[in-house]
Image: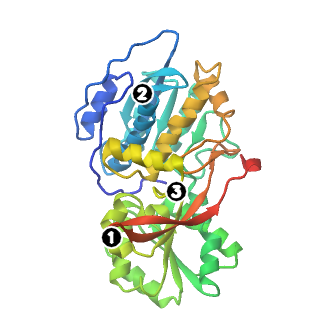
Amino acid sequence: MDTPMPMSSPVHRRGFSLIATAVLAASLSACGGSAPPAEETTRNPAVGMAKIGLIVPLSGVYSSLGIDMQNGFDLYLDQHAGRLGGKDVELKVVDEGEGPQTGVPAATKLIKEDKVAAVVGIVNSATAMGVRDTFIDSKTPLIIANAGADGVTGTNGSPYIWRTSFTNGTVGASLGAEVSKQVGDGSVYLISADYSAGKEMIGGFKKAFEAAGGKVAGESYTPFGTTKDFQPYLDTIKASGAKAVFCFYAGAEAVSFVKQYAQFGLAGDLPLFGTGFVTEGGALDAEGISAEGTQTSLHYTDLIDTPKNKKFVADYQAAFNARPTVYAVQAYDAAAVLDAALARPGTADGRGIARALGEIGPIDSPRGSWGFGRKHDPVQPYYLRKVEKRGGRFVNTLVRELTRAKAPDL
């Protein structure tokens, strides 16, 4: 997903059982807190060392995603005594900022100055595209934990570019057949922010929706990051004759759209569907009752009823006093795949780690079992979610699984 506009969220931090670095301390200060004292770790030379880079936005409008991502990565390390693949981790954290103007230099620093063995993170797809060739040329594995641009992993995938998040088009496509089924003979209006992620999300949905027999009533793309008043677009939707609406928005734009959709009276007449980012994390907290009944698709909800996810949610809440988001899970799983890869022999450098990443097989995750596909994008379950009020708060309930990764696809 390109540069969504997340809601602000509190900074959550705790001490970690890992080898602290000055970069980690600096990044914690940058996101509004001071670094807690690190626990002393006795280094065993026989264990070995893994220098890992983490690049997430810790300042600017996207910092809430970065905080969730760092929390997820840190939690995995804490659960594994600060080690990945049995190796002590030296973690180098840098601030991606709001886009490629800050993200590209930060990622380049990790490779050329810090000389890390692998890098995790990146929210902004423009940043990911801007550094892709640098990672490939330097033979440094990059595990993307959010950026969703369809082209980042390339036509056949590079051995040095991996993704534990999603591709924009796939998220949209996962809901196409379901919406066609629910709407029946009616048509659906499509609306999104006017930037690459929005167009890829809408494009993926539209292709799957029409393949399932669905009819499109119309499309609108609102100026990205500047649209405050959605009424002209809501007027168009109302006049289109559509029986439902499919949207892609995230963060602050999602809140504005969902609230105005309800205020305009459409929520009671036209069911609202969308990719899960429209009701994820702080966005749903701000939307409140306006989002009730909204149906979305995503590869995670904190209400997945499995022992793995229940433990993850409990541990995350205990550590950060917050419910985990999809952004936290994506970084948590990036640590998990590095853990599995580094446990294999011959992973002393980037080339060895890249080879090992292709050999690890399915990952047992809070989101459900998933694995890397041919292009190194995740082949994973997607869930139909519905906003309901439970226990005094609005949540994304899990209705059912929409798709399931099968072994031949891995």
Disc 3 target residue: 305
**Numbered tag placed on residue 265 in the rendering:** none
Q: Amino acid at mark 2?
A: Lys
Name above or below for residue 192 compared with residue 117: below
- Give the percent coordinates (x, y) of residue 282: 34, 59
Mark 2 vs mark 3, CA separation in Å? 41 Å
- Mark 3 neighbour class, 10 Å CA radius: few under 14, some 14 to 19, many 20 or more: few
Disc 2 target residue: 109
Indicate the quadrant containing the C terminus: top left, top right, bottom left or bottom right.
top right
Q: Does residue 344 appear left or right of residue 23 in this picture?
A: right
Name above or below for residue 161 compared with residue 4: above
Is residue 190 visible in this depiction of the protein?
Answer: yes
Asked if the residues shown at circle 3 and circle 1 are in contact, with their CB atoms under 8 angstroms apart, the answer is no
398 or 190, which is in the foreground? 398
Q: Amino acid at mark 3?
A: Asp
- Give the percent coordinates (x, y) of residue 206: 61, 71
Disc 1 target residue: 288
